[in-house]
Image: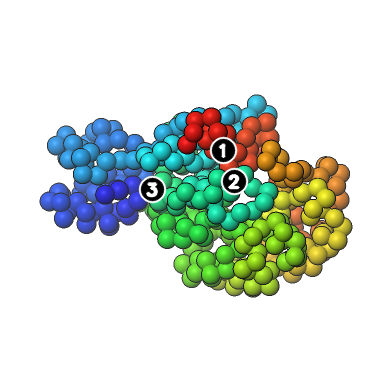
Amino acid sequence: MDLTQMTLPELREYLVSAGEKPFRAGQIYEWLNIKNAFSYDEMTNLPKPLRERLGREAPLKAPEKLTVQVSGIDGTRKYLFGLYDGSTVESVLMKYRYGNSVCISSQVGCRMGCRFCASTLLGLTRNLTAGEMLGQIYAIERDISERVSNVVVMGTGEPLDNYDHLVRFLRMISDADGHNISERNLTVSTCGLVPGILKLKDEKLAISLALSLHAPTDALRRQLMPVAAGYPLEEIMSAMKEYYEVNRRRLTFEYSLMRGINDSDACAEELGRLVRGMNCLVNLIPVNPVKETDFRAPSGAAIAAFKKKLEKYGINVTIRREMGRDIDGACGQLRKRYAETEHI
């Protein structure tokens, strides 16, 4: 029994079925999802016999902070958490003027196989539960003694490949009776699983959706991202437009710039034609170097020129601030290094 991924009504039903008073559910839910308790001993308003019973019947599986890297440049913190079964996951804390933003993982590893991403190098181990996704945020808040205001599900894993736990997580983290992070401060990034995009559209969540695009043509995208073989750009873009028609939240297209691969004038023109006329933002990301690959970022001048070409199409374009560049900033790097040294 895992209380960390129970909604308040589910928790109440569980406790009543166990012969406990219904109001205890609200107390436990508050401890878990507002006060970030990681043990029943912290729940001081619960009777000791109940705490002991819960410890036996529903032990908490809080993440363990294995290591944290802190950037000397901008204070970005890269966490590696250990889970109850020995698996490890990464999360990143980024500090902005508007508040603390956390990028969390949705899976242990990834099976999407994107050639430029370190997350996929160890393959997929398993999905994370909603409780394990929440736990990453709560563990970071406990570590820094500050509240997180924005969450991006863009770490290790493909969120829509773990659909049910993702949606449960989104509803719980935004629950007014729980952590109450606004849906508008939540972003989900996908590599383009069309059925998942269309299903998410019908959830009527006011979250932002980002597409990991990285190439403006099917031919180039198939070279970089195996998932592109199953979902051509025409289908993906149609699904993104359908999502927008229901959600009305500006779409984001993530585009990792790789020197000599997707940074040409022709790529900029193709990308401009692909997304023009949409209510969207193109986020240009200088690719993080991964030692197992040869992908490198273009020069600053080349990135600026690419941005300028896109803007001629009337597109909003940003260049992602390179945070955590002096640490294992790219998804999967810290976990892989830990695996090599600790034999996970």
Q: Amino acid at mark 3?
A: Gly
Q: Which residue is mark 2?
A: 121
Q: Is residue 206 above or below residue 306?
A: below
Quarter where residue 235 is shown? bottom right
Which residue is painted at 51% across and 60% down in the image?
Answer: 160
Q: Which mark's residue is nearer the viewer, 1 or 3?
A: 1
Q: Horizontal placement of 22 versus 79: left or right?
A: left
Q: Secondary structure at mark 1?
A: helix
Upstream in sequence: badge 1 or badge 3: 3
Picture quarter containing residue 297? top right
Name the disc covering residue 321, or none. none
Would you name the residue on which mark 1 appears? 336
- Image disc number at residue 131: 3
Mark 1 residue crowding within 10 angstroms, few (<14) / some (14–19) / many (20+): many
For the residues labelled 2 and 3, the Cα–Cα distance comes to 25 Å
Of callouts 2 and 3, which one flags the residue occurring earlier in the amino acid sequence?
A: 2
* Residue 251 at x, y percent in the picture: 64, 61
* Mark 1 or mark 2: whose residue is earlier in sequence: 2
In front of the other: 36 or 125: 125
Residue 145 falls left or right of residue 123: left
Q: CA distance from mark 1 to mark 3?
A: 23 Å
**Residue type, mark 1 in image:** Lys
In the displayed image of the protein, which residue is found farthest to the left?
19
Q: Give the residue drawn at x 46%, y 67%.
A: 203
Q: Residues within 10 Å of mark 3 (few under 14, many from 20)?
A: many
Q: Determine if residue 101 is in view.
A: no
